[in-house]
Image (cartoon, rainbow, N blue to C red):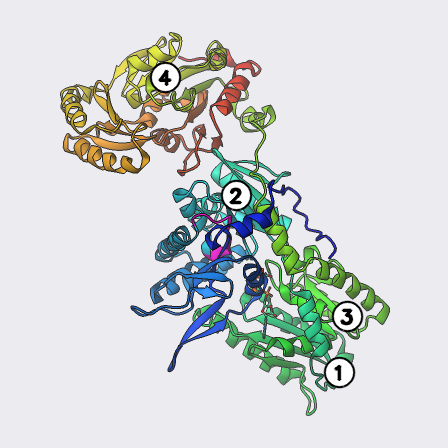
């Protein structure tokens, strides 16, 4: 077989012999496929559960792969199992792990969020889209259950390959439980542009769900770039569009382009063998699932237009439209069926004669061999979706052109149009244009038809579905991607326009932001490099630097040791600096005695490396040295004690903090400092940058939304309200370096602190 010509080129093979690996491990360690449905669907009959192969390209593509390699397929069995009812967990040489779903799950997760929200939105049809919170909740819950089943059955899998929009949150659930898992995802439908995607109230969650993967695959470059765009704009992730890499905190995901193919040889063979049916007229063929994305009404109208514009085709040509019933539980699909029925009636009523009707409409599924015969004998295939991830019908038609070559008319809105350039491409909304293309196809000479079809066939034979699977799996098992360290250009893009001609007020958290997280707070010492860049910022006349920390004021001032900076300790409850009045929140006096009592109580329960840091009116209970499995035990008790003593318990990095519930946090402290330094109209006089790595910094990110440039450092395990993410402390150093040496603000004297 010729090498497949896929545009994704970033994959690097893992060293080692993969065959050896496959033979040496049990089914658990092989590939795991996850999709909404299992490769077979059960239905309940009088004689018990009946098993049938699931329809569709996904199953025919992946089933042979699993049969050959072994592994596990996880999915819904198609029926709600009764108590005690079991289905076989073996299928040929691979295993099957069913995910049990109730009728409510199916209504809300499948018909609801998957098909009433994601399907239309991702096809850029927001008018059809419904956003229903209950559907979303069940979708998230079902996705988590898929992840649980995968973790039970396939913990040691070489690769977990998750399919399609039904399971976009599953990767993140899996990643949370299994940091080292190798996860890949393929989306079979389009990924919409930013402007459409951001209409979804759960845009961040969906993106974070996918970014937990090592590899995320799309049919075409456009969808991949849309996804990268959304990750950058909505999550604040760093991206490299050329290398197609997304960095989200300390994790990196590779994005790839893998246009799916078909079982070319199988279609071709069936076309050769298929029975011939006598047909008087020339045939223009449409084959679709009955779905509003497929543009069936538009196609019928375009055909009607053909008969108006070119009456010579009357009596000689028919539009044969096959439509497989689909999602008939969703009201919109039922409405569409009525619309098509009516439209067919209208056009036939208008043009039919006693011997000829222009449209033959068959609303049912056809067996593969029959379909192949119809493909083979059709003069023209009219594949005109309004939007389509790829569209396999176009490819199947081409594979079946084994006799007199036909002509493929293809919507430019289908992913397939990106590679099937030799097709006559049309805009399905342009009825006249489509009508003219049908006319051109019906009158095209044999030489042109043959040249177009033979190029199309060559490509589809080579880039068939087997090549697609192999190519994806190779990319999925390649080395992890790395993004280049943050460059000066990136920092400039973020900051140059923002800080131009303004003085700058810089707020920096300490632990995890200016120093890496360490086993004990006393070991978090500022590096020489970091001190240098920090002070190059602080020495500037147009820049104020504040350190905002959860440590006590004395502690943070001592550990940084630079008297020219402003310090906010205890999450901003205490503030001090050379140009600012010393501040101590008035309610703190009430907490000093309480803090002492709480300290004693926490000390009593502390064991296995847990310890309490006393910080005057507040406390931190540290768990970094406690074995991970035991942390939740201590967390629960510590939280209870904190609440009992009148504190608010707040989670931090391997710690829990006791904070006075007085409505004061890092966000309020930042506001206090800005007002003290620049007056109530500070937002007109100064630009603000806040950099932090902790949950407590989220208060400041939220407070400063729209008022500052915010950066969250490190792990992407938690969502952030910050605008951008920085991978690590080195990223912070580079950012400060740029700020320290940027050109001096011209108007600095007029904008200087009050
Ligand atoms: P679908 O939306 O299902 O797939 P498509 O790619 O066209 O769309 O596949 C439809 C399949 O159904 C074809 O294999 C076709 O032969 C079959 N079919 C249609 N009408 C039929 C009939 N009347 N009888 C029998 N079979 C019929 C999703 C995405 C696509 C993407 C695929 C694969 O929406 O864009 O190409 O996944 O990734």
Q: Mark on residue 316? A: 1
Q: Are marks 1 and 2 in contact (CB under 8 Å)?
A: no
Badge 3 is on which residue? 441
Where residue 746 appears, as percent x and y from the top left, is 55, 14
**Mark 4 vs 3: CB contact within 8 A:** no
Query: Residue drawn at (24%, 24%), measured in percent from left and top?
Result: 611
Place of residue 156 in the rendered image (x, y in percent of width and height, measured from the top left): 45, 47
Which residue is denoted by mark 2 in the rendering?
A: 214
Q: Which mark is first along the chain, 3 or 2?
A: 2
* Residue 523: mark: 4
SS at badge 4: helix
Q: CA distance from mark 4 to mark 3?
A: 76 Å
Query: Is residue 224 in view from this perspective?
Result: no
Q: How far across and down, in percent of the image, does residue 453 sit?
A: 77, 65
Query: Gap in Å between the C-alphas at discs 3 and 1?
Result: 14 Å
Q: Is residue 221 above or below residue 487?
A: below
Gap in angstroms between the C-alphas marked 1 and 4: 86 Å
């Amino acid at each position: 077989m010729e090498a497949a010509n896929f545009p994704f080129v970033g994959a690097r093979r893992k060293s080692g012999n993969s065959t050896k690996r496959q033979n040496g491990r049990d089914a658990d360690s092989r590939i795991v496929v996850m999709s909404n449905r299992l490769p077979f669907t059960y239905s309940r009959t009088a004689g018990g559960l009946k098993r049938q192969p699931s329809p569709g390209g996904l199953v025919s593509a992946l089933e042979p792969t699993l049969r050959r390699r072994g592994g596990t397929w996880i999915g819904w069995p198609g029926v709600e199992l009764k108590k005690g009812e079991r289905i076989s967990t073996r299928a040929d040489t691979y295993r099957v792990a069913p995910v049990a779903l109730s009728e409510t799950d199916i209504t809300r997760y499948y018909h609801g969020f998957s098909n009433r929200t994601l399907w239309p939105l991702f096809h850029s049809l927001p008018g059809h889209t419904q956003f229903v919170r209950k559907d979303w909740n069940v979708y998230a819950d079902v996705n988590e259950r898929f992840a649980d089943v995968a973790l039970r059955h396939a913990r040691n899998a070489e690769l977990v390959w998750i399919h399609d929009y039904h399971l976009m949150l599953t990767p993140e659930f899996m990643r949370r439980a299994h940091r080292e898992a190798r996860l890949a995802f393929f989306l079979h439908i389009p990924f919409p542009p930013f402007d459409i995607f951001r209409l979804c109230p759960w845009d961040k969650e969906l993106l974070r769900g996918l970014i937990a993967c090592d590899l995320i695959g799309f049919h075409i470059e456009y969808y991949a770039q849309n996804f990268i765009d959304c990750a950058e704009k909505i999550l604040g992730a760093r991206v490299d569009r050329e290398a197609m890499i997304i960095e989200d905190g300390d994790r990196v995901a590779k994005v790839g382009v893998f246009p799916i193919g078909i079982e070319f040889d199988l279609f071709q063979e069936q076309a050769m063998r298929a029975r011939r049916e006598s047909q008087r007229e020339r045939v223009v063929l449409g084959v679709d699932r009955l779905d509003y994305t497929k543009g069936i009404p538009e196609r019928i109208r375009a055909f009607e237009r053909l008969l108006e514009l070119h009456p010579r085709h009357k009596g000689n040509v028919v539009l044969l439209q096959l439509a497989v019933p689909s999602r008939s539980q969703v009201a919109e699909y039922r409405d569409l069926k009525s619309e098509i029925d009516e439209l067919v009636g209208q056009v036939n009523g208008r043009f039919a004669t006693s011997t000829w009707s222009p449209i033959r409409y068959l609303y049912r599924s056809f067996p593969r061999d029959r379909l192949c015969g119809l493909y083979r004998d059709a003069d023209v295939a009219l594949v005109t979706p309004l939007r389509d991830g790829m569209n396999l019908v176009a490819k199947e038609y081409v594979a079946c052109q084994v006799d007199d070559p036909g002509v493929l008319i293809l919507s430019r809105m289908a992913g397939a149009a990106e590679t099937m350039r030799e097709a006559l491409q049309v805009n399905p909304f342009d009825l006249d244009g489509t009508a003219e293309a049908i006319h051109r196809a019906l009158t095209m000479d044999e030489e042109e038809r043959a040249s177009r079809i033979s190029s199309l066939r060559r490509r589809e034979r080579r880039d068939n579905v087997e090549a697609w699977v192999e190519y994806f799996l190779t990319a999925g098992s390649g080395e992890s991607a790395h993004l280049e360290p943050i460059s000066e250009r990136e920092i400039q893009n973020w900051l140059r326009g923002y800080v131009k001609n303004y003085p700058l007020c810089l707020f920096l958290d300490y632990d995890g932001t200016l120093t890496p997280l360490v086993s004990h707070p006393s070991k978090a010492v500022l590096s020489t490099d970091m001190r240098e860049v920090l002070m190059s910022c602080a020495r500037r006349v147009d820049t104020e630097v504040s350190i905002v920390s959860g440590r006590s004021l004395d502690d943070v001032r001592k550990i940084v040791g630079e008297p020219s900076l402003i310090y906010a300790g205890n999450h901003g409850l205490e503030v001090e600096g050379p140009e600012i009045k010393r501040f101590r929140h008035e309610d703190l006096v009430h907490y000093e005695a309480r803090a002492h009592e709480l300290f004693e109580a926490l000390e009593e329960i502390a064991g296995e490396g847990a310890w309490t840091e006393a910080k005057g009116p507040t406390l931190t209970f540290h768990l970094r040295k406690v074995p991970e499995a035991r942390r939740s035990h201590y967390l629960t008790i510590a939280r209870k004690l904190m609440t009992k003593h009148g504190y608010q318990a707040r989670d931090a990095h391997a710690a829990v903090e006791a904070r006075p519930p007085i409505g004061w946090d890092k966000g309020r402290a930042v506001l206090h400092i800005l007002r003290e330094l620049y007056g109530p109209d500070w937002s007109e006089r100064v630009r603000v940058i806040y950099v932090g790595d902790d949950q407590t910094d989220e208060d400041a990110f939220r407070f400063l939304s729209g008022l500052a440039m915010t950066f969250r450092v490190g792990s992407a395990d938690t969502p952030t309200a910050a605008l951008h993410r920085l991978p690590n402390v080195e990223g912070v150093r580079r950012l400060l370096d740029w700020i320290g040496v940027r050109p001096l603000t011209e108007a600095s004297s007029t904008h200087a602190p009050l």
